[in-house]
Structures are given as C-alpha cells and as structure tokens.
Amino acid sequence: MSEYGLLSLVPPLLAIALAIVTRKAVLSLFVGIWSGGIIATGGLGLQRTFNWILYGVVDIFHARILAFTLLLGSAVAMIWRLGGSRAVRNWAVERVQTKRGAGVAAWVLGLVLFFDDYANTAIVGSTMKDISDDVNVSREKLSYLVDSTAAPVATLAISSWVAFQLGIIRAAYDGLELPEEQTPGAFEVFLASIPYNMYAILAIAMVGIVVLSGRDYGEMLGAEHRAAETGKLTRDDAQPMQDVEAELGDQHTDDPRLASFVLPVVVLVAVTVGAALHSGGLSAVALLEALTGGRLGAVGDQLYAAVTGASYAPALVLGSFAMVATTYVLGYAYGTLSLSESVDTTIDGFGIMLTAAIILVLAWGIGNVVAPVENESPVPGGLGTGEYVAEIVQNVPLTAEILPVVVLFTAAFVAFSTGSAWSTMSIVTPIAIPVAWNLTESHTMVAVMVGMIFSGAIFGDHSSPISDTTVLSSTFTGADLVDHVRTQFYYALTVAMVTAGLMLVWGFTRISPFVLLPVGVLSLVGLVYGLSTLDARRRGIDPEPTRTTGDIAPSDD
C-alpha cells in the first residue's frame, strides 16, 4: 500500500474542489500539484512540483497529443480565415433549424467516429460548434454531447481504448496461471464484456434521450434557458477554452466556400485512419487480394489486427498536420491568403489553444503526482493514489453479488482522482480480474469486471475537471472547462446510478444484461422527464428550453 496513505488523495481532490469552487482550472491544478510536492518532500516541494509538470510534457504520448491539439488550433484558425466556418453556417441554415436537429447531428457524428476519442472530440466539436451556435445550443450542452459520446463509443468498438485494454486483460490472465485450454482469448473476453459495459451504452442512450426530448435538468437547464432567451452561449464571466472569433477577428473572404471546411476535415479523417491502420501493419496489397478473392474472413482478420495494433497518437499528429497543409493549399488556390498570412494565422491558431495546452500539461502533471511511488520511468515517483484506493477495496470482504458495483465505483473514484481512464484501467484491471476469478472461478464474472472497469473509468473521466478528455471536449466546443464539468455531472451521475442499480439486480438474480439494458433505457427516459419537470418547477421555468429559428439568416460576419 502507498506509504503516503490517505494523504495521497489530497492533491487530486484539492485540485478538483478548487476548480469547482473557484472556476480557475489552471490555478487549481497547480495548487494540487504543489500540495503533492509538499507531501512528498516534507518541505516546500517546488522542485518536485516542476519536475512532475515538466515530465508530463516530455512523455512522448503527451507530446504528440499536445502537438495534435496545437495543430488542430492552427487548422481551425485557417478554416476561419478562409471563410469555411461561415460557409458551414450558411449551408446549415436551411438544413439544421432546431436545437434537436443540431443535437442529433452531433450525436450521430460522434457514433460514427468510434476509432479514437481524441479524434472524435476534435472532429465533432470543430464541425458542430458553428452549426450549434446558429440554433443557440449552449456551449455547455454541445460539450456534453461531444464528451458523452466520444469515450463511450470508443469502448464499445474496435478502437485505441480496446487495443490498450486487451493487453491488460492478457497480462491479468497470465497472472492467474490457468491451463491454456481454460484461458479465453483477450478479445473473446472483451466481446463478452460489451453488454456489461452499461455506463457506456446508457451514456450514449442518455445523449439521445436528452437531445430528442429537448429536456434538461440541473445546471444544464439554466444554461440552455440562458442561450435560448438571451442568445448568450456561455455565461457572462465564463472563460471559454477557445474563442476563435474573438481572438482572430474578421474572415478574409467575401465568398465563403464549403470546401474550405469540408476538405480539411476529410483529409484529417482520411490521413488519421490511414496512418493508424498502416502503423498497425495493414497492407493495401494483401487487403485488396483478400477482397478480390472473396475471402471476407481474411479481410476482417487483417482489419482487426491493424486496428488493435495501431499507434493512434502519431496518426493524429500526421492527420492534423495534413489538415493544416490542406488549408494552405486552399488559401493559395482561392487567392484568399498569402503564404505570409497563412503562417501568421498558423501562429495565431497556436495562441487560441494556449489555455487548453496549459491545462493539459497541468492535468498530466497531477497524473504524475498520483502515479505509483516507485516506477520504471524517469519521472519522479508519485504518491500512489490509485494503488492506495485499489488495495483498500481489495482488502474489504466482498461477495460475488456486490463485486461488480464495488469495482464500478472503485474505478470511477480512481479515474476521478487521477484524471485518466487509461491509468485507471491499468491500476484496477490487474486487481479486479484475480479477485473475480478467485471468488467465482467464472469467466463470465471476469468479463463483467472488464465491463465495470470501462464503465467506472468513463464515469470518473466525465466527472473530473483534471481529465484530458474533458479538457479537449471543452476546447474544441469553445466551452468553459468547469462549466462543462458542472453541467455534465448531473447526467453522468444519473447514468451511473442506473448502471449500479442494474448491476445489483444482475448480481443477485443473474438476469441477462440484454433484458436489463432496455429497462435501463426506459429508466433514463423516466428520470429525464421527471427530473426536468421537478427542476423546472422549482426554478419557475419551462423544462424544455426552445428557440424560434425563423429569424436565422446566413452569417455576414
């Protein structure tokens, strides 16, 4: 167990509490890291504090995500100056005239881009922001739609998340030392876990329910009424993670073309997917031979191997670079931007991502604070927060009936405290799988553990202002980070409570999850209508914020 014990919880919880109370994410994260430095050294702790922060940037995965974020900022700036944003608005005027229409578009697009949550967040957020603005969807609502679809869908399909978890499942089974004939494949366990990944499934359903019903509750209800009645997409003193119009000024064209938006986005998706599959070993020649030979099984095997073996972070960097390069070509081809103006715009684009980049670096820094006390990397040892929580739970007497719910909330708390769903999976999985096997000797229970770990990790991620995916969702939708967390939490908690209830029923009855999931969806429908009605009555407002869209006209910005 961590030598720091209960003190290991102080830095992440302090950072989260300060962020929620003060709404100052940068200050809160730094204070959280500094408190960890004080605890670790017993002194002022500044050197340890800055080492943790700097090593967060040195990590190659983090450096690539930072490069991807900055390049996306440049691409967004170039698209703005080229008039692509205005062209999308003009195109959407006659096609997306309601909040419901914008919400459905964001939801469906999020479901399609299942291969990586970072790419999902960037593409859906950037694509839907201007469209949603024109029908007065609050930035808080859009960031919820994006965030609550991206990670859940990535855990249900072949994606970077699943590839990461498969390796952990294999390692956990190796530790059980079972005979080979009794050991299922990691992918087989993943497939069996899907119906038990109830938070992810119900979170996606919840987005659809909220969008289609037009109802909200909690702080989201106030945000949507503000946007509908005043046209203010953020609260007056909000600090949006990105405000392109305010920071970049006028667009450089009187003839906006839709291609200025569509082509860069298509290039981003195509290059990212292509580079990822190539890094996973996919051969175009072998794939073509399998297709022409009618060997569909071989095609599936090749695609599965490529997706699970792909390196997504480098692919995202290549995709975002190609996106920026495409905007340069368009600027030259249309005669809209000179090379000098394009370079200046690229640098301006880095600037609009500066706040997001700082918060990402600090979030990774606090991830180092809560890391294991001793680790093999050059990063200074952390306080062992995740291990402390996991070992406490491991030592609690458990029964098979309540084990799934215990693992759900353990994973959620670890993710909430560390800000990392992937770290949560690597911490909790090696403990949960042996506990489940020793308690039941059931491969089904092991699959349930995998589903609960995914569920808890995503719930904790959705609820934490120190999560990198939460930061990126706020960034690409132009929302205030803390406002996004505060408004999303009501919905995340609702889904988590329904998930916990269903898994308790499963634990005591073993009713099929395929029966329980429809019950969960119906429960969410009832809760959305019931809670929105009660909250609206308490506030003296309508539970379904609406806006007349007849006055929307093409933008002349």
Image (cartoon, helix red, strand yellow):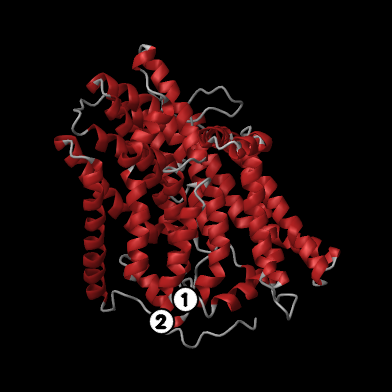
Q: How much space separates mark 1 and mark 2, taking CA atoms? A: 8 Å
Residue 36 percent location from the top left of the image? 48, 37
Residue 38 percent location from the top left of the image? 50, 35
Vertical relation: 551 (above or below) 496: below
Q: Residue at x 37, y 54 (%)?
A: 204
481 relative position to 541: left or right = right
Determine if residue 535 is in view: yes
Vertical relation: 260 (above or below) 270: below
335 relative position to 131: left or right = right
Determine if residue 143 is in view: no
Q: Residue furthest front?
A: 293
Q: Residue furthest bottom?
A: 551
Q: Residue at x 42, y 48 (%)?
A: 152
Q: Amino acid at mark 1?
A: Asn
Q: Residue at x 43, y 48 (%)?
A: 153
* Residue, disc 2: 547
Instruction: Give SS at disc 1.
Output: loop
- Cβ atoms at labels 1 and 2 below 8 Å apart: yes
Residue 119 percent location from the top left of the image? 57, 50
* Residue, disc 1: 136
- The quadrant in which residue 181 appears is top left
